[in-house]
Image: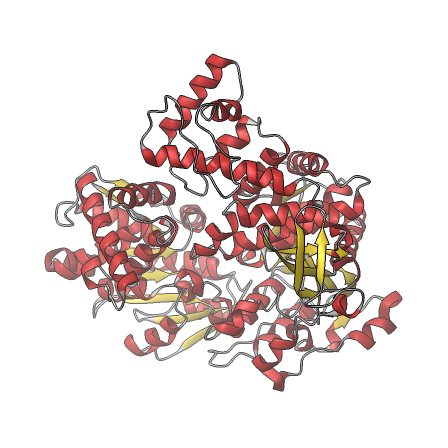
Amino acid sequence: MSSLLSALNPEQLEAVTLPHQSALVLAGAGSGKTRVLTTRIAYLIQSGQVGSHGILAVTFTNKAAKEMLTRISSILPVNTRGLWIGTFHGLCNRLLRAHHQDAGLPQTFQILDSADQLAIIKRILKSLSADDAKFPPRQVQWFINNAKEEGLRASQVETYDDFAREMAVFYLAYEVQCNKEGVVDFAELLLRSYELLTRNEIVREHYRGRFRHILVDEFQDTSRLQYRWLRLLAGEQAAIFAVGDDDQSIYAFRGANTGNMKEFERDFRVSKIIKLEQNYRSQGNILDAANILIRNNSGRLGKNLWTSEGHGEPIRVFNAPTDFDEAAFIVDEVKALRAEGVALSQMALLYRSNAQSRVLEHALFNAALPYRVYGGMRFFERLEIKHALAYLRLIANPNDDNALLRVANFPVRGIGARSLEQLQSEATAQGTSLWTAMLRKYENGATSVPGSGNDTRLGIAGYKKPDKAKKGIEGFVGLLESMRQDCEGLPLPEIVAYMLEHSGLAAHYRAEREGADRLENLNELINAATSFVHEAEDDGLMLFLNHASLEAGEHQAGHGQDALQLMTVHSAKGLEFHSVFLSGLEEGLFPHDNSRNEAGGLEEERRLMYVAITRARRRLYLSFAQSRMLHGQTRYNIPSRFLQEIPDSLLKWPQPLQKTVNKTRELPPRSLGAGYAAQTHASPVRDAAASRWRIGQNVIHAKFGAGVIVNCEGCGADARVEVKFGRAGTKWLLLEYAKLLPA
């Protein structure tokens, strides 16, 4: 027993050897919480307080569960297969398998992943003739999962308006279909398990008698239903050993409820909180910055990380003129660190939003530095970007079959798989592309140019498909012809912007409940096109598409290859690195704009910053850009308020820029709070009008004809105007490329 406990510090030892009582262990970043959890399990078994069958331990990832099982098996000679250690979903699955009849499930019930669940929802919406535009399948999916995570069945959902009533109808139809097929989704595993324990006293009392010790990892990330499940399972006799850190609660968007920690204190009469504050990961300056930053949050349980490893190096801060300069600085520092002997895999480049990765990836690509995007796709490989590139490829070359197959029915326009299969067969028989096969459908009966606004023709000779498929193909042909005609002669950034709006991609992701990140990525594609125009001798669409293919395919780090790790801050939780670069520390970006509109949003952003800082062991870089291209225009930024919250004594500003940095380091005062955020996107709006152009001025465009300026913004190469044309509608045009003439 002494060997089991000898490596623990006093606080860890206190937690591991607690008597049979519920306890809250506040475990700071890098404080050895996994060691405490596994040693606690081993101690309970080795001391004879409980057999291995009497322990249930909940983790949040399968990786964490496997690590715990591996550590326990190395400590104790027990068969770990009998231990109930796993994720909430894994443990609920095990419970439902054992009691499938009581839960109303077939013995062979199958679990749906997210894609399978979405496919069922699409079938249901189709059978109910639901409007995909009004009720996007992904939004219906979110509604159903959110209701389940709140513990609500379709009959219990509050239907406060027509939209909610329709959603409840879809939810009910989905319930019926899943029961008919004998399948469950991930949210259903927890909800049905909770219902089983609530409804069946025999099953509930059996497991209450069995699991006298319940251990929970990452307790701050539990949802309301997960906490209710734990409370129901524990009853009055079991002791819950909850390990968590309220300062690292960053998953409110996934349903995590930080209030569970305080409810747990009250519900289980927790008399003492054990704080694990000794950090075994980071050096002192990094921890001091994290401690001071997080003290600005209210309602914390409170702790102060410390280390015996000394202060270490100061945190390096870089003030970049532009986002491209920021990326260049990071590349240079990565090279310098590698020259010092730090492996690329021990460096992480973090960003708040996925859309930021595009400029960073481009700089790494040009520097031939191998990198790997952790927990996500490289920019040009992301689904929404591949859809957008497919439309661009069709604008450049409509005979591109792969591109056509990707987007012919995306966003949904009624062209089913069977229609496409028939077209493929006809194209093969005729020796043509799919596009040519589509056009040949129009040879008889077409009386106007597709997309011209008077599409009264389109009698398709010999076409025997259902009306919905016929209209879908007609609409797609008209759309593509219209886009190809309207984009002819336009500058590349305008082609991309035009395509995003007219293809329906932007509207599709706007309608998605969780489509904000994908929209940011699509807008970043406009930035990529704008940057490419500035770099290339020719602004041709084909050159840009070739460039995108090269960046997607080359310098991809292979399996096992030493590579720089790129990831969002959310993805970095639980990881650690020798050196960490945290980019984009600007108001509106980090903290994110959205945090201003959400209760507790700014405090969650600060917790996210805390997580980012504590990923670094030895060296931490913080960087921000005075100007950054977003949504196709340059945005002028001020540094993040989080930088102000870190004392100057912990920071090191690069000497060559010291004078400039000190002058421009105008950080938002704490007293201004959320009201200050409205100023964070300051840019010289109307500068375009102050020069040659003004609102209300009549102009002529070579392609769109006569129009009138209704809005203008930006300056220099980023100046643009919004023009209302007679037939072409309203369009935003970059003045550098639009070649407007006064009327």
Residue 151 located left or right of residue 617? left
Residue 19 located left or right of residue 520? left
The location of residue 61, given as percent across then percent down, is 42, 51
Which residue is painted at 37% across and 54% down in the image?
A: 139
Foreground residue among 390 and 285: 390
Which residue is painted at 27% across and 45% down in the image?
A: 129
Report the number of discs.
0
As drawn, 312 above or below 515? below
As drawn, 317 above or below 207? below
Residue 71 located left or right of residue 546? left
Q: Is residue 510 visible?
A: yes
Quadrant in the picture for the C terminus: bottom right
Q: Is residue 209 visible?
A: no
As drawn, 29 above or below 481? below
Among the 4 quarters of the image, the one containing residue 663: bottom right
The location of residue 255, given as percent across then percent down, is 39, 63
The location of residue 115, given as percent across then percent down, is 38, 42
The location of residue 297, given as percent across then percent down, is 53, 78
